[in-house]
Image (cartoon, rainbow, N blue to C red):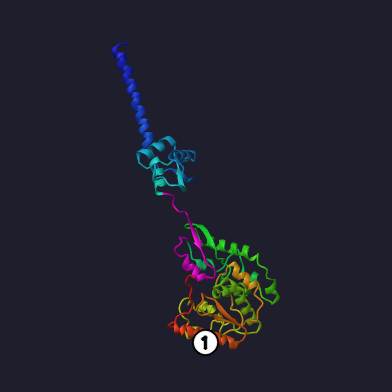
Amino acid sequence: MTVRRRRGIAGAVLLVAVVVLIWFLVSLFQPFAGSGHGAVSVRIPRGVGVGGVGDILERRGVVSSSFFFQLRVTLAGSRGDLKSGTYDLRRDMSYGSAIDALVRGPVQTTVTVTIPEGLSRREVARLISRDGLRGNYLRATKRSTLLDPRSYGAKAPSGLEGFLFPATYVVRRGAPVDQLVNLQLRAFQQAFRRVSLRAANHVNLTGYDVLTIASLIEREAQLPRERRLIASVIYNRLHAHMPLGIDASVRFATGNWTQPLTDSELRDPSPYNTRLHDGLPPGPIGNPGLAAIRAAAHPAHTGYLYYVVKPGTCGEHAFSTDAAQFERDVRQYQSARAANSGRSPTSCRAR
């Protein structure tokens, strides 16, 4: 073999090596790669190694080669930094972009909204104001095509108060607030179908009346065992044509849920003032849970007409059938309150 021929072969081999090296480097570092196209959801299970992650990404079309992905992760020193979870990625991403996304961890695409029992629409609106949903909750809960309060016996409903079922909901971050409202209304419909209204209908109370009573119970009963007892007081007072005298309805009318009620607030002429007006308020004062709805539909059979908080307890009430006993219970409460520098004489410390 001549020198010229050997040199030609060596040059060809070198050229091939250079071409292969360039291909390898371009494939590895992707200097011309874009940001990808087309969204794809990818779940990376906990405990999967870099090889497994690369295989998942290649199968889903996120990266073109599991081998090169693994090599890039190794060169970047990020083998122990890839995080499990569900990702919203793109097809044909560069290795660097895919690695950056998996090192940052999955972006939270949903929000969990927990709504406690008994809160009013306005209170819920304040509660969810920072949950990343779009729109005005009060406006969204004014009316809905999913539910008409009149079908439950409401005569002149002022919104969907009472029907916005309290629970924990998962909603996509940035979704319209109407999606949360629709979930609440559907959850209410499912729950309310499980409640028998036979006892309430027997005394001419509608489903809307039951919801109204349940909303009062949510604000008055701190102990589960007292829900049906408080319901019985409400039923008995309605039967006796006595004002209910429930301050929670005054608080709903005035918007004062936290401070002591003033004399002027207690004289508020609102139809929700159950100290001044007989019968139930015009509608629910909040959104009750299933336990309160069931208690409102099935009150205990008692002769109780009164109740007041027992001093030294965690929200327990003293129930009575006559005004004289009630006055004694009230004096005991007021005496304990005075001895406690005007603060509520209740105690919820761990026992």
Place of residue 49 in the rendered image (x, y in percent of width and height, measured from the top left) = 44, 41
Q: Is residue 107 magenta?
A: yes
Q: Quadrant of residue 319?
A: bottom right
Place of residue 125 in the rendered image (x, y in percent of width and height, measured from the top left) = 49, 68
Which residue type carries mark 1?
Answer: Arg
Q: Secondary structure at mark 1?
A: helix
Place of residue 86 in the rendered image (x, y in percent of width and height, measured from the top left) = 48, 48
Closest to the observer: 13 or 106? 106
Seen in the picture, residue 277 relative to 193 is either above or below; the reply is below
Seen in the picture, residue 24 relative to 248 is either above or below; the reply is above
Q: Looking at this view, name the residue that lies furthest to the top.
A: 1
Place of residue 122 in the rendered image (x, y in percent of width and height, measured from the top left) = 50, 71
Q: Quadrant of residue 294?
A: bottom right
Question: Which residue shows up at 35% across the image and 33% down it?
Answer: 25
The N terminus: image quadrant: top left
Question: Which residue shows up at 54% across the image and 78% down it?
Answer: 249
Q: Is residue 157 magenta?
A: no
- Answer whether residue 65 is visible to the viewer in this image: no
Q: Quadrant of residue 298?
A: bottom right
The residue tagged 1 is: 331
Question: Which residue shows up at 59% across the image and 62% down it?
Answer: 187
Q: How many marks?
A: 1
How crowded pointer 1 is (Cα within 10 Å; few <14, some 14-19, many 20+) is rated as: few
Q: Looking at this view, name the residue that lies furthest to the bottom.
A: 324
- Answer whether residue 105 is visible to the viewer in this image: yes
The answer to whether 281 appears left or right of 88 in the picture is right
The answer to whether 89 appears left or right of 20 in the picture is right
Region of the chain picked out in magenta, as a range:
105-133
Closest to the observer: 105 or 151? 105
Seen in the picture, residue 28 relative to 126 is either above or below; the reply is above
The answer to whether 254 appears left or right of 302 in the picture is left
